[in-house]
Image (cartoon, rainbow, N blue to C red):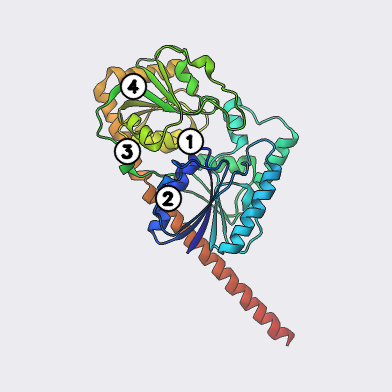
Amino acid sequence: MRILVTADTVGGVWTYARELVNRLVGKGFDVVLVSFGNIPSSEQIQWMDGLPRIDYRPTAFKLEWMQDSEDDLRASAEYLQAVIDKTIPDLLHLNQFYYGALECPVPRLVVAHSDVVSWWVAVHGCEPPDSAWMRWYRAIVQRGITNATAVVAPSQWMLDQISRYFAPAKQAAVIYNGRTPSLFHSDHIKENLITTVGRLWDPGKNAALLLQGKMPWPVCIVGSDTQPESEARTAERYKSAPGAQFLPQQSEEELSELLGRTAIYAAVSRYEPFGLAPLEAALSGCAVVASDIESLREIWGNAAVFFRNNDPESLRNALTRLKEDPVFRQIFANRACDHARRWFSAERMVEQYANLYRKLLAEKTDLEVQRESLGSEMEAQQG
């Protein structure tokens, strides 16, 4: 079976795509991978070295959530259609909404990783103001969802947002994201360190919450401080915060080492449809402190210590409790790690996707048989 997968190289979707493609190839699938956003660095594509059964096609077309992306999206859809015509995949696994509306005779699976409207509501408490761009964005997302054969989201919460703000899908499923546990170091000696991973320019990630008052241990914030569409650095005012260290986006090996020596991971997001970084921290043996938002409650249950969303005092209290009680901290580190290994492995994720692929292809075959049968009956009647 040949699967065409789209991805972007800007955020966590690239990590997700790596896990997906690696495991699909291991299961005997042929994969055509097309990326958008930016041409990836050599470090980003190193994982493909020696990987069989993969046809990779990088592009720099803009992503649908970027301003002034309309022309790029039309051009990228034409490019993608040409790739489809040439490679003849059995199914499309699309990690952008826009391409769900492609006209092609194969099943189109759209994965709803996030969207601008639910992000805005989580950050601002209301729907985004009306504008020409927002009307266009809502229209293309809705069109992609309603034309897709099936829609998958990484949490039930995210799936609900898609139905609420855009449209219900013909078929819908929740498949939680997954990571490979062996990539992380749960047995490292822990330091008195609080870490979070999140773009400082993104209020949805809310990393600056850790800088609002003194935290019980030193804080390390990892992530870009420069927006993808701008050279402006949005976080200079934070750089002098006492007790805080700022690191740029890290390689997988660097981040794995950092999380391996981190005692507490702070998942402070106001908007988090799933959250790969807390999962990576849990697999690294960190105790997880998480914002009490619906999606993180769904994903982490009793395996994290929760604090009131966007409340620095509640966050500080949760962190202090873990700092002052090593036994309590170890209990939650073990809970998070066990929970992550059980529910959020890459193996589990890809097996669920493979089962869905087979289901969608079987439905397509059944539909084609029905159409052929109906056509034969009509010919017989006309004869």
Between disc 4 and disc 1, the foreground one is 4
Q: CA gap, disc 4 to disc 1?
A: 25 Å
| First in residue order: circle 1 vs circle 2 | 2
Q: Residue furthest front?
A: 42
| Kind of residue sitting beneath label 2 | Met
| First in residue order: circle 2 vs circle 4 | 2
Is the residue under label 4 in contact with that under label 2 (CB below 8 Å)? no
Residue at position x 61%, y 48% in the image: 168
Q: Few, some or many C-alpha atoms within 10 Å of disc 4 (few <14, some 14-19, many ≥20)? A: some
Q: Position of residue 165 (x, y in %)?
A: 63, 39
SS under mark 4: strand
| First in residue order: circle 3 vs circle 4 | 3
- Height in image: 217 above or below 161? above
**Quadrant of the frame with the C terminus:** bottom right
- Count of marks placed on residues: 4
Residue 295's disc is 1
Is the residue under label 3 in contact with that under label 1 (CB below 8 Å)? no
Between disc 1 and disc 2, the foreground one is 2
Disc 3 target residue: 184
Disc 2 target residue: 48
Report whether residue 351 is seen. no
Q: CA gap, disc 1 to disc 2?
A: 32 Å
Q: Few, some or many C-alpha atoms within 10 Å of disc 1 (few <14, some 14-19, many ≥20)? A: many
SS under mark 1: helix
Residue 193's disc is 4
| Kind of residue sitting beneath label 1 | Ser
| First in residue order: circle 1 vs circle 3 | 3
Q: Nearer the viewer, residue 237 or 381?
A: 237
Q: Few, some or many C-alpha atoms within 10 Å of disc 2 (few <14, some 14-19, many ≥20)? A: some
